[in-house]
Amino acid sequence: MKLRKIKFALLGIACMAALSGVIMVLWNLLIPEIFGLTSINFWQALGLFALARLLFGRFGGGRGKGCGPGFGAMKGGAMSEKWASMTAEQRKEFICKRRKFGFGYPFGADHFDTTQDDGTRKED
């Protein structure tokens, strides 16, 4: 078990070093030409990487820990109470209004509002 932790720590350090190297190379190729700033060294790139992680949270896809709570995570809040008191028609109208303003899921994914109570898909 101890060997596994050491391997994991070494892998983490290697990943940080590799990402810092990539940041340094990209910075030195792009930023001095575009903005006229100076080049950076490896340690400055490592600091920039650490700063970005502190400011923006985790890198990666999806809604991770650093992205904030979603609608379902706000149980007991005002929106949750409003949602619970809505009829099915009011919920559908609310969802349609939100979609008009660009809220919703991309790529036509199935949603909870596109299935009937028995679980079969509605025809549009």
Image (tube, rainbow, N blue to C red):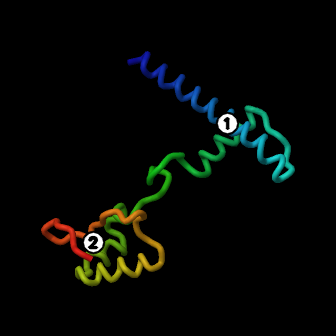
**Relative horizontal placement of residue 49, taking residue 57 as reference (left or right):** right
Q: Position of residue 91 (x, y in %)?
A: 29, 79
SS for callout 1: helix
- Picture layout, residue 83 above or below residue 6: below
Q: Position of residue 116 (x, y in %)?
A: 18, 72
User: Quick one: label 2, few (<14), some, or many (20+) residues within 10 Å?
Assistant: few
Q: Which residue is mark 2?
A: 113
Q: Position of residue 11 (x, y in %)?
A: 52, 25
**Relative horizontal placement of residue 56, taking residue 83 as reference (left or right):** right
Marked residue nearer the N-terminal end (1 or 2): 1
Q: Which residue is mark 1?
A: 22
Locate the N terminus and report the quarter of the image it occupies. top left
User: Quick one: label 1, few (<14), some, or many (20+) residues within 10 Å?
Assistant: some
**Which residue is farthest top?**
3
Instruction: Answer with the quarter of the image where residue 12 lies.
Output: top right
SS for callout 2: helix
Q: How far separated are the C-alphas under marks 1 and 2?
A: 44 Å
Residue at 51%, 25% (x, y): give it: 9
